[in-house]
Amino acid sequence: METRNLGGSDLKVPVLSFGTATFGDAPVFKEWGANGVKEATRLVDLCLEAGVTMFDSADIYSAGQAESILGQAIKGRRDQVLISTKGTFRFSDAPDDVGSGRKHLTKSIEDSLKRLGTDYIDLYQLHGFDAKTPIEEAVETLNDFVRAGKIRHVGCSNFSGWHLMKSLAISDRKGWARYVAHQAYYSLLGREFEWELMPLALAEGVGTVVWSPLGMGRLGGKLRRGQAAPEVSRLKDATTARVAPPAADEQVYRIVDALDAVAKETGKSVAQIAINWVLQRPSVATVIIGARDEAQLRQNLGAAGWRLTPAQIAQLDAASAKEKTYPYWHQAQFAERNPFPTN
């Protein structure tokens, strides 16, 4: 498995990471998968055999179950894996059990360490931006945990450009640990990431950790023009459908048509091609893949170790092009001064 540096850090990560949202059986998440310790351990075994050594979780995945199950699945081999997890979103009904303030963040990190059965986390990320907490408070709290040796590297997730840039500026001014990763949504269905977050990542040395490269399963190969939707789909859950990245049916079909054409040329599956496209984009350090079961995991693992041709990438780019909002459509008119980012 190919490895890449995570942003400007010295942490090398595999180009594919495994997401643990399918560990546990709490409402909403059980619609994605409901793997217990036995099933999770088998998936971890297969990942390690393939060189996928990074496992991503979050405190809210099945209300802490995912972290606990991951901790049991890696027991006795902590030195073989990289653990990435997240906190910020509401964990319980308690009034202050939410946010990136010092009190909640401290509790979140300490509880994650216990559930994971480890004394350090390789990458800890704020799961989303907290506009009600001063940025200084959030990044200083993370810095304190880095200095205490409980976190190796810090990052964020689902930030806008100014959220990320202001956080980096404060860390640089104070001499605190800076974000080396931004876990962000990026797929052929969701290319808005390219407009601002990608150039920022390259300019500031922030590695992109991609979530949902298949657009919440829409690019997995089961959705096609004129065919009934699959019986098993996370989008059938109303809560999941509400928070899923938006995508019009015609947009999905147009991209899947292009993926089908490339699949015939390469002999790869639609899902493998969609993931490989993301792997070849600038700023991307690792792409998180998930799996309900062993068969799905083996399929997704086949997305790495080969490359699409420039012509195939251009074909997929054309099929997935999206009209830009301001100021990005204006900047695109002056490509001489605002070229598309390159690695």
Image (tube, rainbow, N blue to C red):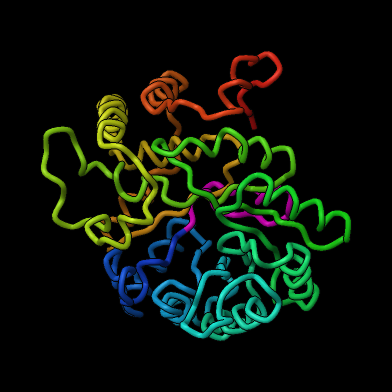
> For this rendering, which residue is in front, 209 or 82?
209
The magenta stretch spans residue 14: yes
Residue 333: image quadrant is: top right
> For this rendering, which residue is in front, 35 or 335?
335
Residue 243 appears at what percent x and percent y?
38, 56
Residue at 55% across / 68% down in the picture?
A: 85
Residue 142 appears at what percent x and percent y?
72, 70
Residue 25 appears at what percent x and percent y?
31, 76
**Height in image: 244 above or below 69?**
above
Residue at 30% across / 63% down in the picture?
A: 32
Residue 27 appears at what percent x and percent y?
30, 74
The magenta stretch spans residue 338: no
> For this rendering, which residue is in front, 265 or 329?
329
* Magenta segment boundaries in residue numbering: 1-17
**Height in image: 247 above or below 212?**
above
**Height in image: 17 above or below 81?**
above
Q: Is residue 336 left or right of residue 263?
A: right
Q: How many marks?
A: 0
> For this rendering, which residue is in front, 101 or 145?
101
- The quarter of the rendered structure image containing the C terminus is top right
Q: In this view, does 225 lie to the left or right of 90?
A: left
Residue 315: image quadrant is: top left
Residue at 30% across / 26% down in the picture?
A: 258
Residue at 29% across / 44% down in the picture?
A: 218
